Amino acid sequence: MTDVILHIYDVTNSGSDKTNSTILQINKIFKDGIGLGGIFHSAVQVYGDDEWSFGFCEQGTGVFSCPSGKNPMYTYRESLILGKTNFSIFKVNQILRELSREWPGNSYDLLARNCNHFCDEFCERLDVPKLPGWVNRFANAGDTAMEVAGNTAVRLRQAKTEIVSASKVAYRFLLGVTNNVKAGPEPPSNSNSGGGSPIFQATWLKNIITTGAKPSTSSEAENQNGVVPQPPIREDGKALLRHMSSSHDS
């Protein structure tokens, strides 16, 4: 049994002193002032003196390690003990090998798959509590906003398609009424076969407009648009942990 420690940094690797200073001010106000969160990098330490995290790279795994609390790319803030894991060092190394295959560097996404998401996954496999909500709150809020915007756009496109379809039905109906008027009175027909009469068509059109022109759900719209979820990218399993210690952007 050993402690699982979370190391937290202010993200100050923008290359601009002005931007870095702004990020520090944001973190000071939103985390230290009102406790909401900020823009942070995180890493997990378990057994030994190194911490493990995740960042972008074009090839190979995005999992890397460095001496705990000493990542030179960021400004160290604080550390938190998340709990104790009952796993042996052998099991922890096995988990890290699995994560190194499942988290290639080119799958990095600032909002949806960043270093904090990796640490959450690592902690879950170590059977300890996940990161406090404030650590990744800005990314989660941004990702939610993008998802809502995307779903809204899909629904609007679907509603537009259905409105156009309803308009075509209405046009064909009106055209049929006009043709019937021009052709003069029709001979009497069976009252039970009124499907071709203007009155029946008007009732049917009203039902289409009132009940049939509702936008589909986002999942249905996505299926109709041909969007197929892509499987997660995985490594080929040949990367060794000794190659994971080079630093990556987070």
Image: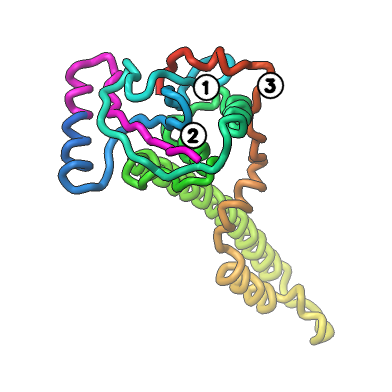
Front residue of 128 and 110:
128
Front residue of 182 and 151:
151
User: Which one is earlier in the sequence, the residue at label 2 or at label 1?
Assistant: 1
Front residue of 35 and 20:
35
User: Which one is earlier in the sequence, the residue at label 3 or at label 2?
Assistant: 2
Residues in magenta, as a range: 1-23
Residue drawn at point x = 47 percent, y = 12 percent = 246
Q: Is residue 102 visible?
A: no
Front residue of 90 and 162:
90
CA gap, disc 2 and disc 1: 10 Å
Residue 19 magenta-drawn? Answer: yes
Residue count near mark 1 (Cα–Cα under 10 Å), binned few <14, some 14–19, many ≥20: many
**175 horizontally vs 159: left or right:** right
Residue 147, above or below 237? below
Residue drawn at point x = 47 percent, y = 40 percent = 120
Residue count near mark 2 (Cα–Cα under 10 Å), binned few <14, some 14–19, many ≥20: many
Residue bearing mark 3: 237
In the rendered image, residue 78, in percent from the top left (x then y), is placed at 27, 33
Q: Amino acid at mark 2?
A: Phe
Residue 128, above or below 192? above
In the rendered image, residue 94, in percent from the top left (x then y), is placed at 63, 30
Residue count near mark 3 (Cα–Cα under 10 Å), binned few <14, some 14–19, many ≥20: few
User: Which one is earlier in the sequence, the residue at label 1 or at label 3?
Assistant: 1
Q: Are marks 2 and 1 in contact (CB under 8 Å)?
A: yes
Using the image, tell me which numbered label, if any, was put on residue 62.
1
Dividing the picture into quadrants, the one containing residue 72 is top left
Q: Quadrant of the C terminus?
A: top left
Residue bearing mark 2: 118
